[in-house]
Image: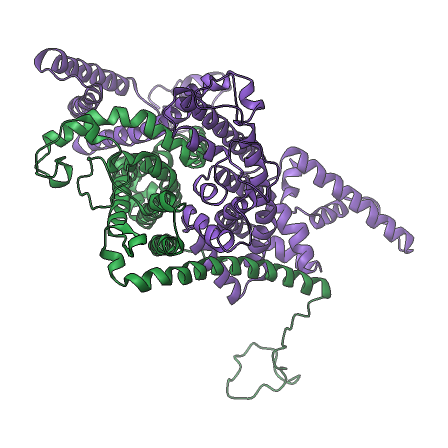
Amino acid sequence: MASRAPQTSLRDPNTADVEFSSRRALVQLASFADKLFIWIARGGGIVTLSIMVAVGLFLGLRAQTAFGSQGWNFLTETAWTPENGKFGIAAVLFGTVTIALIALTVSVPLALGTSLLISELLPERIRGFAISLVDLMAAVPSVIFGLWGVFFLQANIIPISLWVSQTFSWIPFLAVTDKSGNPLTDPSAFTSSAVIAGVVVGLMVVPTQTSVMREAFSQTPLGEKEGALALGSTRWGMIRAVVLPFGRGGIIGGTMLGLGRALGETIAVYMIISPIFEINPQILKSGTNSVSALIALRYGEASDTGLSALMAAGLVLFLITLVINFSASSIVARSRSGADSN
Amino acid sequence: MAKSTHPIVGRTFLPTLTDAPAAISTRRKLRGLRLDDVFDIVGALASSWSLTWLLFGWLTGMQSSVAFVVVNFVLFLVAYGVITSLKNRREEIKDRIIAVLLASAGTILISALLFVVIYTLGRGQLALGHLNFFTQSMEQAGPLDPLTVGGIIHAVVGTLIQITIALAITIPLGITTAVFLNEVGGKFAKFVRTIADAMTALPSIVAGLFVLSAFIRTGIVPRSGFAASLAITVMMLPIVIRASDVVLRLVANNLREASLALGASKWRTVWHIVLPTARSGLVTAVILGTARGIGETSPVLLTSGISAVMNFNPFAGPMISLPLQVFDFVKSPEPTMIARGFGTAATLLVLVLILFVLARTFGGKAPGNLSKSAQRAVHRQSLADEARIEAAMASSGSVSSPRSSATTNSTASKSSAAPTKRNQKK
C-alpha cells in the first residue's frame, strides 16, 4: 500500500480488502448497577403490564358466563333482568351512543372554533392564558358538571326542547310523543332526556378535543402559512388552504378521543338521566340509559350472574372505547410527521 | 425622496442627524383593529340588537331569553356581513364572519367554564359559611337538620387517605414504567406502551367494577378506602404513565449522549440527567393525574360506598370521598342537603383549582428550562465540582492549573443540567 501514488482512488469493490479488519462487535457490558437499574425498570414495566392485562383478562373471563348464557341475544335484547336470565345491552348501548353523538354535535364545533381561535387568531400574550383555561376545564370533576346539569341546565333547556319538539316535530327523532303518537307538551316529559345529558357530556369532552386539535394546528409549517398570506390570502383563506388540511388528522383524532371519553362518562350521565330499558329514539323525551349508568345503578343488587352480566356490558363498552382510542391515536400519529424519529 | 432637504443631485451624502427623525414617518400599525373595524362591529351590534328588540317586543310575541340571544346573534352576523360588504370584497367578508364565529366558540366555551365554576362556588356559599361544615362529620346530622349541624370532614379525610394510597402506588410504578419505556426500550417496552395506551380508554366505572368483582366479591379486600384506592390507581396509572412518557421523550437526546460519552453509567445518566431535566414535567403529570383521581366518583361508589361517619382506617369499613359525598347529598330532595352538596362540590373544586395552580407553578416548563433558584443551585454545584477537581489534581501532584474560564466551562457542562449553561451566562 505504501507504494501507491498519493492520489485518491476509488476502491475496487472486487479486490478483497484484507487490510480492513471486520467490523468490531460493540457489545455493551453493563455494570452490576446498570443491570440492576435495567431490571428494576423492567420490573416496573412488568408490574404495570400485569395489572393491565389482569384487568382485561378478568373482565373477559367473568363476562364469559353472561355471554355464554345469552349468546348474540346479548347485543339485541333490550331488557335487563339477570334474575330471570334475560338481559341484553341493546337499549343501554343505544342510549350510550345517542348521548355520545349529541355530545359530539355540541363539542366538535366548539372545540374546532376554540382551537383555531387559540392557534391562529389570539395574540401571543393571551394564548398561554387561554390554553391554561381550557386545560383547567379538563380538570373540573365530572360530578360538578353533573351538578350544574341537574340544577341549572335542566330547568333552562326545557323551554327550548319544548319549542324544538313542536317546531320540528316532522323530524322523527326531535318529536316528543306518547305511545299512540300524540305530541306531549308537559314540561315533565322533557326532563332527564338524552339531550340534557349529551350537552353536559359535550362540555366535558371539549377540552380533550381542543387540546388535540390545537396541538395539530400549531404544527402547521410556518413557511406555508406565510406563503399563503404573502400570496394575498385572508386569514380564513390561509386557515382553509393550509391549517385545516395539515390539521385534518388532529381534527379526526381529537373528535374520536372525545367520543371515547363521552362513551365512558358515568356520574354526570347517571345524575341527569332517568334510566329506562327500552330503545327511545326521541332524544328530547325523558328517559334514556347508558352502559356506565347501568353499572352504577345495578352493582349493589347484583348476584353473581348479575355481576357477570354487568362485567359483560362493561367489557363491550371498554372494547368500543379501546377501538375508538386506538384508531384516534393512530390517525393523530400518522398526521404528525417525524414524531417517531427520535 | 421628493421632500428631501438636500437638493444636490448625483452625489451620495450622509444624512445629518438633526433632520433624520423628521424624515422617518411613524411606524405603520400592521396588526390590531382599525377604527373602521371597531365601527363595523359596534354598528352591527347596535342594528342587530335593535332589530331583535323590535321583533320580540313589537312585531311578534316571542318571549324566551334564549331565543332572544340566538336571534340576536344570527342578525348580528347578517348585519356585520352587510356592513363589511360596503367596503370589502367577498373573501374579506368571509374572513370577518369566520373570525366572529371562532371568537364566539371560544367565548361560549370559556364562559361555560366560568359559569360552572362560579355557579358551584356561589351556591356553595350557603354551606361554606358555617365553620362546622369543615369540622364535623354527618354522623349526628339527619336530612332535616339545619346547616349548623354536620359537615364533610369525614369526606375530606377519606379523599386525602384514598388519594395518598393511590399516589403511593402510582408515582413509583408510573415513573419507573415511563423510565423503562424511554430509557431501556426494546420490543417489550413497545408492547407495554401499547397496553398502557389502551388502558387510558378504560372507563373509570369499569375500573371500579374490576376491583369490586376481583377483590371485594372474592373476599381478598373488604369494601373499604383501600379498595377505592386500588380502583383509583387502576384508573390513574395509565394517565400518569402516558404523560410522563411524553415528558421523558422531550428530554434532548444529546444530553443523554453527552453523559454517556463522559463515562457515566446508564442509571447515573437517568438519575442525574434525564429525571432532573424532566422534573417539572413529571411533577405536572403527577399533579394533573391527581386532579383526575380526586374527582372520580364512580369507582369509589362501587368499591367503598357511602358512609356518614369518620373513618381513619382505610382497610375496614366504608370510606366516603368528596365527589361521592356530593353525589350522595344531592340525591336528597331536602334543600339543606342540596346546599351541603354544593358546599362539598365547592370544596372539591377549590381543591382541584389549587392542584391545578400548583401544577402550573411547579411544572409546565420545557425540559431543561430552570427557574432562577434552580439555576443558582446548578451554578453552586458546578463551582463546588471545580473546587473538588482542583483539590484532587493538587493532591495527586499534578500542576494545579490557574482558575481559567476554560475550567469553569468544562466543569459546568459536566454538572447535571448542561443546557442551563447558556442561561447562566446571561
Decide if residue A271 is on the left or right side of residue A280: right
The C terminus of chain B is located in which quarter?
top right
Q: Is residue B248 visible?
A: yes
Residue A101 in the image, given as x and y percentages of width and height:
25, 43
Please state which of residues B344 and A262 is positioned toward the viewer in this rendering: B344
The image shows residue B378, relative to residue A334, as above or below, that is above
In depth, the one of A185 and B34 nearer the eye is: A185
Note whether residue A231 is visible: no
Mark count: 0
> Is B172 on the left-hand or right-hand side of A103?
right
| Residue A290 versus residue A72 in the image, above or below | above
Chain in purple colour: B
Chain shown in green:
A
Farthest residue in the bottom direction? A15
Which residue is pictured at 48% across the width and 40% down the height?
Answer: B305
Task: Tell me: residue A38, above or below residue B210.
Answer: below
Q: Position of residue B178 (x, y in %)?
A: 55, 54
Of A284 and B11, nearer the camera is A284
* Residue B376 location (% of width, % of height): 70, 36
User: In what quadrant of the picture does the N terminus of chain B appear?
Assistant: top left
